[in-house]
Amino acid sequence: MAKSLCRVKSTHSSRATCVLLLLAMLAAIPANAAPAANTPPVVRIKSGQLRGAVRATGGAEFLGIPYAQPPVGELRWREPVPAKPWAGVREASAFGTPCAQPVLGAWNKHDAETSQEDCLFLNVIIPVWPPKEALPVMFWIHGGANAGGTASSSLYKDGTLPEHGVLLVTVNYRLGIFGFLAHPALTAESPHRASGNYGLADQALALQWVVDNIAKFGGDPRNITVFGQSAGAQDTGLLMTSMVKDLFQRAIAESGTSFSPPLPALADAEQTGLDLAASLKTPSGDRSIASLRRIPAQELLRQLAALGPDQRPRMGPVVDGWVIPHSPADVFASGEESPIPLLFGTTTREFGMEATPNELRTMLFNVDGEFASRTLASYGLADGDGATDPKYGTPADQWAADSNFRCPATAQAAWHSAAHHPTYEYEFNHPIPGQEAQGAVHSSDLPYVFGYFPKSGNISGHFVEVDTRLADLMESYWTNFAKTGNPNGDKLPEWPEFDGSQAFIEFAQDGSVVKAAGLRNRQCSVYREEMETRKMRTQVHQGPEVQVIAPLLPQTKEEPAKKPAEAPKPAEQRQPAEDSQPPETPPQPQR
């Protein structure tokens, strides 16, 4: 327009008119005008400038942001170090690499084949760019047994969750031997006299990065919800007991609990590290860790894979006295966890297990000891072979999900609620369409939480309108909770607090919401009483570390159960549906 208006003869008066017109047009443009819709967004954070990408929905995404220096060489098995500043503008339009991991199944094959030790990246997804107001932040910790998986997935990035008015952060963290190896030599070289929780320390540093930088992306650093699924849910609970428990304001735990599986003491984890180093034939003494640090990541994974099953220990979080100062069960029992709202839940099937009634009886005697007779009765195995439940599966399926997921989760929630913190429970009973025969297994809720329906893989299905509606409903609950600490909102079915009645809602097969109370109370009351009894016995022998604010159940005397005459061979567990953030096979319960 200005060009056409200025196409006049070159006279003094015409030039003056042209200049005045141009100045008037420039004055009409606001100083903070948004960039063109297709202009890549740029932000400046403490480390330097980042150039992201425009989302098809109108927002922005910044991918592959380094929050720590590469944990390689001498930084392997050390606490993470903040990323070094960079010059110029760093491109942030593509994912960073997944953390080093072995192939654990089809669910993580691609992640494993592209994984590297240089992997401490996070991703930021913003629904509107530029943001008009400070947005609640949802900080996602992926699952995968703390051994596999990645934050860099279309499942998380390309769904509709952010469009419900939140800013989403997903984070990579060290896994397996790189994230959770404890060893006396590592403890000795640590300024904190701790080892084994490098993956959790990564999460803690990433959380601090969010507090320090997220305002530059339009997020509210004073309103952060940490949420995760499976191992990510366990880690969420652990962060509530950790050195960074005051850095976030809400928590969501999907199919995972801070103390299931139980965390070993540092000395026990160190011994596991010593045994593993010996199996790998490293030099003894102070040279062991130096030798292990010289082995390339993929070669170390290859050597681990070559070990026999009895030589490959499960490595995960540990009570190290620094990142995790105390037993998480003790912390929750004493009411010393993060004093924040908690939303949690499980799927109806989680992990199934194949076992005959006789094999299951043997397992229960081995695990529950003096409580076994009551446990058997709760599954119909005291005087018979039990019954298959249309929702929860066979007695073996029921016990596997109860003992590893439902009962620990409700125990943790009972303590949290007793400390007068808002607590909300859900049960997910909506199988992936086309997979109804196996029920709502572990990870089947993820498409609905993120509003993303995969077209391939083990959580893909024939999704229809009821699935879209259910996803919108769950996303609304999740994001309401992130905004206010309460999932309820206009036009949503009421979600009651957990409280003393242990109220919960069920996301049903038809996509509706059903209110209920006391999820699996008959089975879980035995679990909670057994846990409480053993805790008290430990305190008698070792002296009380913490004051229990509310026992889970009154203690009753239980007569020892008699073992069956024959001990059948242990049953094999069945793998349920797998996905990009997978179902991992849980260990046998240890209480």
Image (spheres, rainbow, N blue to C red):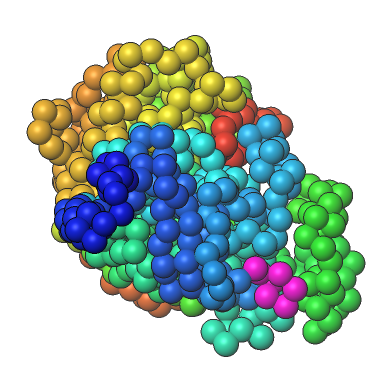
| Residue 509 at x, y percent in the picture | 34, 17
Residue nearer the viewer, 516 or 232: 232
**Residue lying at 70% horizontally and 60% vertically, measured from the top left:** 117
In the image, residue 253 lies at what x, y percent?
A: 37, 47
Asked which quadrant contains residue 37, the reply is: top left
Image location of residue 402, percent across then percent down: 43, 36
In the image, the segment drawn in magenta is 70-76
Query: Taking 423 as reference, is 353 above or below it?
Result: above
Residue 427 magenta-highlighted? no
Question: Between 450 and 405, which is closer to the camera in this rendering?
Answer: 450
Residue at 38% x, 67% y is: 213
> In the rendered image, is residue 491 in sight?
yes
On screen, 150 above or below 195?
A: above
Quarter that holds the N terminus: top left
Camera-side residue: 569 or 37? 37
| Residue situated in front as seen by the camera: 69 or 482 | 69
Q: Is residue 74 magenta?
A: yes
Give the x, y percent position of residue 416.
26, 56
- 281 w.r.t. 377: above or below: below
Q: Is residue 497 left or right of residue 552?
A: left
**One can see residue 234 in this view:** no
Q: Is residue 179 left or right of residue 476?
A: right
**Residue at point 24% right, 65% down?**
222
The structure residue drawn at horizontal position 70% and vertical position 50%, both measured from the top left corner, is 115
* Residue 279 quadrant: bottom right
| In-image side of 529 versus 106 (left or right) | left
Question: Left of 295 or right of it: where is 97?
Answer: left
